Image (spheres, rainbow, N blue to C red):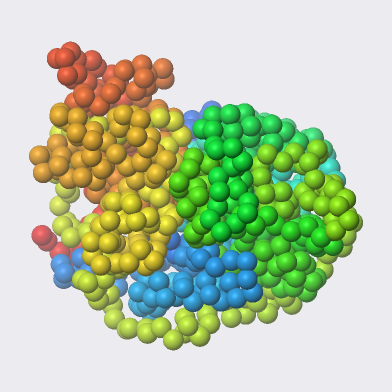
Amino acid sequence: MAAAADSLSALRHFTFNDESYTYYSLQAAQENGAGEIMSLPRSLKVLYENMLRHEDGLSVTADHLKDFYSAVRERRFDKEVFFRPTRLLMNDSAGIPLMADLAALRAAVADKGGDPQKINPLIQADMVVDHSVMVDVSGQAQALTKNLDLEFERNAERYQFLRWAQQAFTNFRVVPPGIGICHQVNVEFLARVIWTQTSSHGTLIFPETLLGTDSHTPMINSLGILGWGVGGIEGGAAMLGQPITMALPRVVGCRLTGSLPVGVTATDLVLTLTQRLREYKVVAAFVEYFGPGLASLSASDRATVANMAPEYGATMGFFPVDELTLQYLAQTNRGEANALIEHYAREQGLWHEPEGPQPVYDELIEIDLSEIRPSIAGPRRPQDRVLLKESATRFEQDVYQSAPPLQEGGVPVRGHDWTLDHGDIVIASITSCTNTSNPANMLTAGLLARNAVKKGLSTKPWVKSSLAPGSRVVADYLSDTGLQTSLDQLGFNLVAFGCATCMGNSGPLAPEITEAIENSSVASVAVLSGNRNFEGRIHPLARANYICSPPLVVAYALAGSMRVDFEKHPLGHTADGEPVYLADIWPDPEEVAQLVNTALKPDRFLERYATAFDGEERWQALPKPRSKTFQWDPESLYMKEPPFFQELSTDLPARSPLEGARALLILGDSITTDHISPVGAITASSAAGRYLQSLGVAEKDFNSFAARRVNHNVMLRGTFANIRIRNEMADGREGGWTRYMPNGELLPIHEAAARYREEGVPLIVIAGKDYGAGSSRDWAAKGTHLLGIRAVVAEGFERIHRSNLIGMGVLPLEFQPGVNRQTLQLDGTETFDIQGVQTLEPRCMLTCVIKRADGTRQEVELRCRLDTPLELAYYENGGILHYIGRQILRQADIRN
């Protein structure tokens, strides 16, 4: 290349509506020798602009900029790139622990004589409180109010902490409980698409970018905004001004053609994409959509598709900016900058014309939308798509045939004249921002409910039905159209504006149904319009879980069983005894389209979001203590001071050899963060439940693991304690059990870990493929660290969890292809010496010496998955926040 692509030489100006703007021109960078930047995928253009704008000679240098294009075309995916987001989005489940970590870090800095206010967000950080509400009450008019009452009662200490944080930190805002789900609030309200700010060069204009402490943050990709999910640990680093380091991502172009057939929903599309893209293996890639088919997908349809990027394994599911993007911004009361957005997007080559020139993609997959068919996914993974017409047959094959036989006539239920059988649906929930952000989906569900009521149909009595939209706007248009009345008649009363059932906060089943399931082996089912259906996630008593569109959730509630074939079996009968099939009540698509046009009104969004940060009376009544550091209550069982920074000093922690290690767990493929750190209700029989009972906490006050995340004593006991996890060392027993070695005693995970800690024995975890899939759950790494686990050795890692492990000082190591726990015949009796952990380099090879009980030895090579120099620095410091805290102490010239 002829010249370095330095940032100042790429500065350009334009005047728009009599206003002057300065921007970092991608065309100018190309002309200055950066390579064919304008031919890159749009997502990489945004990433390159971000690097260009943040060139500082340290994290981003002229050489980084010069080499970027050639690295893309040469597919050098080990190249380190740095990214600084415009803002950070948090839910309360990850956000409160993150802010608690910052509070603890403030205390550690203050204790050393430093300025605690140096620990403060340097970019805009928004938290939406959406993960705490539980569906305790459903099927009644007062369900929403009662659930919100219980939420405030249970979470008073957590919310008081947030009130302190609001005044203690700058650049930090909170959307209080009862407003909506963070991703839907983000898409409907917070997002801008472009940002402007005053700089030394004038008014600087640039693309909005985002990180979120939730894996479904890519929902924002639907508006052409670059963003993805990270763990709370990595999010905290970004918030404190650290660049996010990543390996150069693959970009897979997904060309869409055609349009969806009548009766096919965006949910059907995303479930098909999830299956196809998982098969194609897009883990950690950017998937970028383009092509003529985009013109048939509304911004809401795109939001449904982008939301489930983590389910198909991608970092992002990126859609470009086009006319439909601007239409949605106008419909949601944000259209005032549309002309400027279009002008900037065209200048930078970010605008999409369906038939115009497209970027050059090194990998390409094509999807014909006209071939998509109605589908569901289950019973255990979102990529396990099933055609709706085959769902009953597949349930028979996947679940029923392997379920134990029940007594003839089914399992009796106390106080009722009906019984439960395998496949009976005990939870049917319209939930999650994935689908409730989509007016077409929601209005189709409402119309189907209206048609069902007209035919005299009703929800089966054993089904707990609920409706938890991602924003109050949804409730407004369902009410204005009169469709909420019909949903209410089928038991789909509003229960919450939050994640609820999608994240496992489904609340209790009726006592008699719980009793019947617990006293039998009935394979009960949950259906939901969410994005995940992992084992044990939705409800402990639901043995099978299926994802489907909102209208199909209503249909399954009417059917009452997964064994109903919608084409062959009626959902019920009219008063005259006439059978009613799903096709008889499926809404007219023209009526759906008419109602969608009336649902998205700018005034509706203006009214609902005008007071989004204020909260209602209960929130405003909470005290707001004013202090630089938080006053921890040692008696609190919700808000314990995090233990991670108590030994913080300017010196790097010593790295002891990893020798004589024992495997605490040996796990199979697709171990999710739900397996590692459950998020739902704490049960009385669990280790965490027994611990709370020992402290005098009644079972009704246990709350969820998500709500107890700032109590490490509870969370430690929940780590690897999912009721469905299968440790291959535990002799076939499900749940949080392991064998303590060398005597082989079967113990709860945390008790065995405590014994090993007392003896000074280091611990590792052995796992299969796709380790850490699912939510961006920082406690899956924090709990791993607190158990004393020094390294995780797996066949492969999901992106976010690998980063979280590094962020907590746990070493991710990868088997070489063709080598795994099975080929090595590991059973937990071995010890492991992992050589070279004191002299690591990014992606270096390490030798692991396996010493077997019979005295034999075997050596295997492991890949160190510290992929970049900055990740190595984080690991050496014991974690990301330790790295930042140590920097602040050094800058203040504070010695140990």
- What residue lies at 29% left-to-right and 39% top-to-bottom? 737
The answer to whether residue 300 is left or right of residue 356 is left
Q: Is residue 79 visible?
A: no
Q: Position of residue 329 (x, y in %)?
A: 71, 65
Q: Position of residue 557 (x, y in %)?
A: 68, 53
The answer to whether residue 852 is left or right of residue 82 is left
Q: Is residue 713 visible?
A: yes
Q: Which of 177/238 is in front?
A: 177
The answer to whether residue 776 is left or right of residue 719 is right
Total label count? 0
Q: Position of residue 98 (x, y in %)?
A: 36, 61
- Name above or below for residue 883 compared with residue 834: below
- What residue lies at 51% left-to-right and 32% top-to-bottom? 404
Q: Position of residue 862 (x, y in %)?
A: 31, 25
- What residue lies at 82% left-to-right and 68% top-to-bottom? 598
Q: Which of 39/618 is in front?
A: 618
- What residue lies at 45% left-to-right and 48% top-to-bottom? 518
Quarter holding the C terminus is bottom left
The answer to whether residue 101 is left or right of residue 28 is left
Q: Which of 398/81 is in front?
A: 398
Quarter holding the N terminus is top right
Q: Which of 362/534 is in front?
A: 534
